[in-house]
Amino acid sequence: MILDIINKKRLGMKLTYKELDYFFNGYLSGDIADYQMSALLMAICINGMSDEEVYALTKIFIDSGDVLNFDDLPGIKVDKHSTGGIGDKTTLVIVPIVAACGGTIIKTSGRGLGYTGGTIDKLESIPGYRIDLSDSEIEKQVRDIGFVITGQTGDLVPMDKAIYALRDVTSTVSSIPLIASSIMSKKIAGGSDKILIDIKVGNGALIKNREEAKELSNLMKNIGKFYDREVRTIISDMNTPLGFAIGNALEVEEAMDVLKGKEVNNPFVDLCIELASDLVSMSLSISFDEAKEKVIEVIKNKSAYNKFLELVKRQGGDISKLKISDKTYKIKSDVDGTISKINALEFGKLSLRLGAGKEKVTDKIDYSVGIKLNKLIGDKVKKGEVLATLYYKKDIPEVKISNIYKFD
Ligand code: URA
């Protein structure tokens, strides 16, 4: 049976629910070995899956663990997910905005993956901030203040944890059906009514081109329909880091600047406004344009910023203790010109080498280190002008400017 199933997928045939269930649950229970699951994952990666197979796999993933139910809570609960990027701190900005607009948002977030940072790591840079709220604590907090950002609770989709770890080391992460079932199973098990997915495309993202992003978008919307959940998607650029900051405490600081209205009219702020408007529109059942007016207003009148402070306090954090390293190194331009490209992936690698993420599971993150861009795409610079500042702790990693920047 095991070999028959691998062989069927190797030949590009469809697997039934029963076959997928047998194989994936067999893996979780230890009856199917890593090398056999790796072979099936690679066959899926190469030959793809039909929509029916993806629905079946998503169900098998959801059924592998707890499913949260927040039906007793008032309001339409919304959730948002990003496929991951460099400097992606949008959650820290948009969740308080949605709450300030009167929406209800239960956001369960994850840790960094590869070069991309995770919201939970960023929040842990705030001393005391609790990322391990229980289901009943989540419920109480949502009743009291309308929103929460916490780590994944309980035993939500254990199948994804096991399969993701294997995909990570077998070069099978980038399969569209596998990404779709991984993300959608977690979002559906998370108990929200409506879901927004930010699909990142570019060299700093899992998805490298727009065609694949559209395919993933359609597939996730179809899974949503199958499970009676409204799913909206946004396809956004990840060739360039998002915003000015990369690294945990630095990104929290930047998120606060956006909420205070200090940063305006840059691609990061624009994306936050778009995502937040979609979420508010979904949670309050109003048009996107109406929602956008509310979003801009709560940034202007600082109520979104105050919601952020309320969130941090409620979850035990002390924002006054946020620490950014005082050791800095300035990357200076070696030419005169206009910046035409800033390579997100190279900055992701650099931030990892500074210690802002984990290269090995056993590594410890240094929350105080990272990178701040002093210039963005389109800025004119003179030779010797500062392009970016590294915040380091131990060593300054080697920086090859020509790998990161292109100038016109
Ligand atoms: N994020 C996920 O949660 N799963 C994937 O497979 C890819 C990105």
Image (cartoon, rainbow, N blue to C red):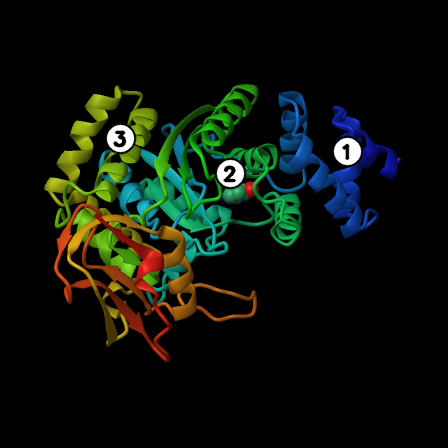
Q: Measured from the top left, where is residue 340 in percent x and y?
A: 24, 46
- The residue that mark 3 highlights is 277
Left or right: residue 288 compared with residue 238: left
What residue is shown at x 34% (from left), y 35% (from top)? 104
**Quadrant in which the N terminus is drawn:** top right
Question: Can residue 130 be spotted in the picture?
Answer: no
Q: In the structure shown, which secondary structural element does the residue marked by tag 3 occupy?
A: helix
Chain-order first, disc 3 or disc 1? 1
Left or right: residue 5 compared with residue 189: right
- The residue that mark 1 highlights is 10
Query: Which label lies toward us, 2 or 3?
Result: 3
Q: Which mark is residue 111?
A: none
Q: Measured from the top left, where is residue 319 in percent x and y?
A: 25, 63
Q: Measured from the top left, where is residue 113 in percent x and y?
A: 50, 54
What residue is shown at x 63% (from left), y 53% (from top)? 165
- The residue that mark 2 highlights is 190
